[in-house]
Amino acid sequence: MTLSVVPRPRVVEGHDGALVLRSPLRVACAEESREVVAVFADDLAGAVGWDVRLVAPTEACDLRLRHDATLADEHFALHVGDEVDVTAAGPRGFAHALTLLRQLGPAALWSRGAQLESWTLPAVTVVDGPRFAWRGTHLDVARHFFGVDVVKRMIDLLAAHRMNTLHLHLNDDQGWRVEVPAWPRLTSVGAWRRRSPLGHESEGRVDDVPHGGFYSVADVAEIVEYARRRRVTLVPEIDLPGHAQAVLAAYPQFANTDEPLEVWDHWGISTHVLNVEEATLDFAEEVVRHVASLFPGSPVHIGGDECPSEEWADSEAARHVMAVHGFDEAGQLQGLYTRRLAEALRGDGHAVLAWDEVLDADVSPGTTICAWRSVDKGVEAARRGFDVVMAPMQYLYLDWLSSESPDEPVAVAPRPFVTTWEKVYGFEVVPEGLDASLAGHVIGAQVQLWTEYIDSVARLDYMAFPRLCAFAEVAWGTAGELGEFRGRLVEHLARLDAMGVAYRPLDPEGTS
Ligand code: ACM
């Protein structure tokens, strides 16, 4: 039996018969699963106006949630017979089961304010769970700022695909996006730029429209609570010591030169990076720890990609620091930041991630590497004993063109850098070249949504979907035959329509 759901479940066994559900839906569950049921109830009420009524375990019900501590985290079993029985070890498994249950119903269950008389479920048993613990999406809110509602909507969309991680890229040369009360100019100055490139950066045109915005401490708390209820892990990223021009516009004392700087109004990589004075390392540590503290228990990403070292090589003060540490190359100075920030964050109880460039200088053991430059960088990290999140641009950068068509909207890289949803679907999370004994280092994968050329929710939807649907199944670990997936995807698009997602339409079969 095939269920038209995404991602595809691991084990599906069809039975004879069907179960018809109506409002009010009677739900029996233990105290620990009340919150997951409350979220499901909110979704049903918003979508089709149905009520959920909690009943005692001894009463007749439509949906029953049972704990089974022997199941792995995020795994579940769902059985549709005379009632719907769901078994899981904890909230994340229950949440995935209820998402699957909703996908077994009509697309109206994903809309807002629709009418639904009844909901007929096929009699079926599903036993399911993800292969990879890290199934993420990265969202760059620095190049273009997206507000609290857009972030919450993205959390919903990830949960709808049983993905579990949202990585927020919170600063870059073009903007700083989170309030730090002790350093107010980070947002009063660093969150605003005068203009942005218009069309592709290479065209040299600008829009002369100021752009900016940031999350207040209260905004972050709202996002954190929303994600917690949806069982999506947030990963804040503060990217230092490169990608720092917005910081330097706000606090020039941390620069290597006296050149006055503004928040950058170009895309690309600014050569202006933090200096390596002790006070600047102190600042970076304080700010990163503060931002991390707003995301209690979250893994924290310390960036570390694309950090030009020319300014350090040209600076007498930086060359002195190199001599003190016995470094031959200016690039090694980056390791001072990587080690300092990683150790401070770990001391505060956060797991730490960084982009793969940190492998080129000192990086402390236990840092998880996001391999973005290539699959081989993931292999290198695993061989060196690091855990890895696979994020290679050649497969998982959703800011790349969706097809060869000249009608695609402007994207970061020109043809032939094209990432079709079919290419995403064919991605192997565990690299073929990796020794099987090291496969356990690959904890999962994530797609990237860099937003230089994504300046609206409509464009975000277009770039993310349906490639993200294909990725969700890859990361769940059940990707199979392309044609079979396409059939399910076509039905799944009705759910995206119901959610108001302006996805890129599929090309006619066999043309892409
Ligand atoms: C990156 O794309 N610079 C991580």
Image (spheres, helix red, strand yellow):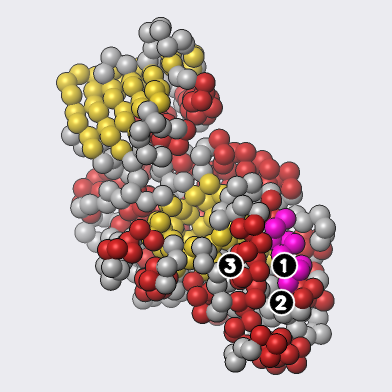
Contact between labelled residues 1 and 3, with CB atoms less than 8 Å apart: no
x and y, in percent, of residue 142 in the image: 63, 62
Residue matched to label 3 = 303
Name the residue at 49% across, 49% down: 165
Name the residue at 40% across, 7% down: 58
Query: Which class describes the residues within 10 Å of circle 1: few (<14), some (14-19), or many (20+)?
Result: many
Comparing 486 with 175, the one in front is 175
Left or right: 114, with 431 as reference point = right
x and y, in percent, of residue 134 in the image: 43, 52
What kind of residue is marked 2? Leu
Q: Quadrant of residue 375?
A: bottom left
Q: Is mark 3 within 8 Å of ligand 1?
A: yes
Name the residue at 40% across, 43% down: 161
Q: Earlier in the sequence, mark 1 or mark 2?
A: 2
Q: From this view, report whether residue 64 is shown above or below residue 227.
A: above
Res. 108 visible in picture: no
Res. 433 visible in picture: yes
